[in-house]
Amino acid sequence: MNARDAALAGCAGACLALCLAILPAAAPAGESIAGFRAAGPTVPFPAVSGVDAPRPVPSGLTAAGYRKLAESHEAAGRYQEASVAYRKEATIRRKLGDVNGAKVEESKADWWHSEVILYREAPLRGARCGPAKFEPASGCYIGAIVERDPRVGGDHATFNRLTGKDHSLFFDYRSYGVAFPVEWARRLKAVGAAAQIAYEPTQGLEGVRDDATLQEFARAAAASGIPVFLRFAGEMNGDWVRYNRDPAEYIRKWRLVHGVMRRLAPNVAMVWTPNAIPEHNITRYYPGDDTVDWVGVNFYTVHHHNNLLSRPAEREDPADMLRFIYDRYAARKPIMVCEYAATHFCKADGKTLPRYAADKLRTLYTALPRRYPRVKAICWYDIDNTTHSVRAGRDINNYSLTDNEEVLAAYRDTVAGPYFLSTVETGGTRESGVRFEALAPGRTLSGSVRLSAWAKTHDDRPVVGYRLDGKPVLATAARPYEVEWDTRRAGNGEHTLEALVFVKGRVAARQSVSVRVVN
């Protein structure tokens, strides 16, 4: 930290300490304040001394001009303006064909952008399963790979016990040509779980044929008696696999495998799964809606990319990695995050990072029900790659969920609610469930209402404060910032509900919604 940064940090810290000193002490979780009760611990409500309106960012600059402007806004703490300027620079670079440069600037724009959206939890009754194979009526399946976790030893019931919740599916890898994992599937069936299989033609696509090898795999999958999500030839957009060279050939082989599964294994759902990056070539490999049941995506939260200290990754929001796939396919297909994990040990700098991993997993998992409701499944990669790496050269991060209590506790708490599902649904109607509605202006509210917020900002632990009719009610730093509001305490009529996001005592984002209370 240089002298200027140290001075700014010291000033911000002193201001925040002064604000907190004159405010009432934090209320414990569960204490009702003006009809509001927080689901988690509260913190003192930061002082609001007026919020500077974002300054307009001029038009007509060059990419270099926008870069210089963005950096000046960033240095001055005007982060929304910095975000806009970085995005304008990225747009110019894309038009010039500099895709990689555009991605770098877009990531900066994403990081500095702040936003908050209020949500209301709503019950779902009698909801029918979706049109895709095994698509749930509502909610999100949770899964993991546990075969290489020494604290679990491949025992799925043990993993469920440690995480406090039964998981809907478990995944593992299978090279093309190797027989279907019959015994593994039997163990999954014993705990009521489905299978997700990364079925990888590691020797290339030439050997993928409609022959005895593939047909026997399909028949064994059918005989397993459990739902099977088959992730054939995933990460095809990456140059680290042997089947990324010819998109047309890839599509032919995908359609061949789909045809065999449709003919012989009706319990198999085909999951087309690119890696989140690179993006520019993903759509070339899409084999068509008629042969894809689910669209998947793989991505990870690291602390440094590729073990390089010169490539820090702290300023990456894992939910942003979903956007490309989600924006293009979610309207047509359910989305599965087939592999995700956040590192809590980075070999590049030798740091143990449990808080970092806990914050990132909370950021992603709590965003799914609110911002990404078409994500219908997510699976954690529960492997310490420093000792049990699946691929050579990737022994640089520890993604194990169970060997750090802070990370495990964060996961346990985050997936505990009813939105995250313990059983794969095979059709019909579910009696009950929950969904999250963005709180629309003019919404009529009655009785007790459960509210939450999706907050995006440049800090992994922002504070969200709630105000009613301009008066502070409570503040919390616990994602997803859930509160129970007894509207009867407010009285009938029009009310203004606000959510404010604070970072180091400053308002980073806010939303104000007018609602109508009727009791």
Image (spheres, rainbow, N blue to C red):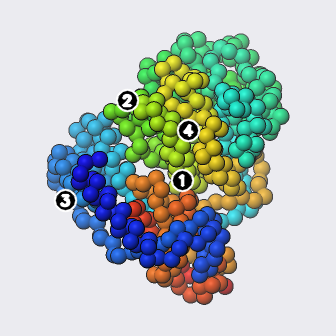
Q: Residue shown at 76%/32% (left/top)?
A: 155
Q: Residue shown at 35%/65% (left/top)?
A: 14
Between circles 3 and 4, the one closer to the viewer is: 4
Q: Are the residues flagged by discs 2 and 1 in contact, CB closer than 8 Å? A: no
Q: How many marks?
A: 4
CA–CA distance between discs 3 and 4? 40 Å
Between circles 4 and 2, the one closer to the viewer is: 2
Q: Residue shown at 67%/45% (left/top)?
A: 141
Q: Which amino acid is tagged 2?
A: Leu
Between circles 1 and 4, the one closer to the viewer is: 4
For numbered disc 4, what is the local secondary structure? loop
Residue 160 in picture, x, y percent from top left: 74, 41
Q: Is residue 258 visible?
A: no
Q: Which amino acid is tagged 1?
A: Ala
Q: Which amino acid is tagged 4?
A: Ala
Task: Identify the residue position indicated by label 3 in the image.
Answer: 58
- Looking at the rendered structure, which numbered label has been put on residue 308? 2
Q: Which amino acid is tagged 3?
A: Pro
